[in-house]
Image (tube, rainbow, N blue to C red):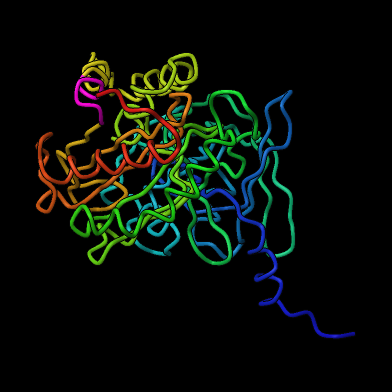
Amino acid sequence: MTPFDSREFRRALGAFPTGVTVITTCDAGGKPFGVTANSFSSVSLDPPLILWSQSTTSSSYPAFRDCGRFVVNILADHQVHVSNQFAKSGADKFREVPVTAGLGGVPIIDDCAAHLECVKVAAYPGGDHVVYLGQVEKIFRSGHHSLAFGDGRYLRTFAHDLGEVGSQTGTASLASLKAQRIAMASLPSICERIGQRTVGIAVWGNQGATIIGWEPSAHPVSPFLQAGVVVSLTQSATGNAFAAFMPIEQTQAAIDDELQARARSGQPDNGQFAQRVAETRQHGMARAVGAAASPRHKVKVNAFSAPVYDASGHMVLALSTTCEADRLSSDWDGEVPAALRDAARELSQRLGHVIDV
């Protein structure tokens, strides 16, 4: 028999992308422990059961072996640093990681995509690992997108299916597909037209406003540009454009979900979103002004987004630019937003949209 190649086995498992979690607990003395794990899986809905596995050589194994409870912290896509920190052995894993005490005092990592507070109900040996079975007692889901891992690298999750092709207004209609082809081919020239600034396009997919392509320019805003990202409707310029110019019946449910998630996370809207939508409609395009470093780009950025319409007057995509704040003024009447708005109008005209003069 050919010897089993454990490295090839690991590579094969890497073809199955997973979410990324940090499992936390505390010992009898209240000392916190945590470990990064992608072995998490659901088991049962009734009762609500989950499982995860841990190496018996892990330094935190005795703590989890003897604990009565643990928390599954499902990391958001801006928490790569948290995953890396808890994957290391021997370090102060909780250093500069904000946490809140959950049931039984077990630490919950703040700002995750979700967390599950569990009581441990069983443990089963499995080779060089132990499989823990937990019953979920309390859950929380934020509005953040989840972090993923596959083929040895971190990934961001996105919706592969942008919706059925049809003649109705909305997701991925034939007009939208035509607009996407034209807009993608135009991105290099638009990038040049707005002064070599990062430019991209987004469509309305079944998960919301979804970036489908970027032209990073000679001075890309960051190395973290990625197609398939579903952006915030309430915080991003691209999302604001869809919220302002698409039919409200298509966007309202997603907007409500996002605002409710923000309120649950302690960041209530208090009317700012409605004000941004009103400004967007007034100026014919959306704007986002960076007050701090962007969680995605790691630098302070400003952004603008202009709608593109088809022959029937329906918004089919957003044309957006994002750039370091010191290279892109937030002035509504600046040269860059004016050029971007003109480019969006020209794309609309190519799609048969008649511009009222």
In the image, residue 309 sits, relative to residue 212, either above or below, namely above
Residue 227 is a magenta residue: no
Residue shown at the point (68%, 38%) measured from the top left = 42
The image quadrant of residue 223 is bottom left
Query: In this orientation, which residue lies closer to the viewer: 46 or 210?
Result: 210
Query: In this orientation, which residue lies closer to the viewer: 192 or 71?
Result: 192
Please provide the residue range marked out in magenta: 279-285
- Residue 259: % across, % down: 37, 20
Residue 193 appears in the rendering: yes
- Left or right: where 95 falls relative to 116: left
Residue shown at the point (50%, 41%) measured from the top left = 74
In the image, residue 107 sits, relative to residue 79, either above or below, namely above
Give the number of marks.
0
Residue 282 is a magenta residue: yes
Query: In this orientation, which residue lies closer to the viewer: 347 or 194?
Result: 347
- Residue 51: % across, % down: 66, 42
Q: Is the C terminus in the top left, top right, bottom left or bottom right quadrant?
A: top left
- Residue 70: % across, % down: 53, 38
The image quadrant of residue 196 is bottom left
The image quadrant of residue 313 is top left
Magenta part, dominant SS: helix
Residue shown at the point (52%, 26%) measured from the top left = 139
- Residue 43: % across, % down: 72, 37
- Left or right: where 158 falls relative to 346: right
Query: In this orientation, which residue lies closer to the viewer: 208 or 334?
Result: 334
Q: Is the N terminus in the top left, top right, bottom left or bottom right quadrant?
A: bottom right
Residue that lies at the very extreme toward the right in this rendered image: 1
Residue shown at the point (62%, 41%) measured from the top left = 161
In the image, residue 46 sits, relative to residue 67, either above or below, namely above
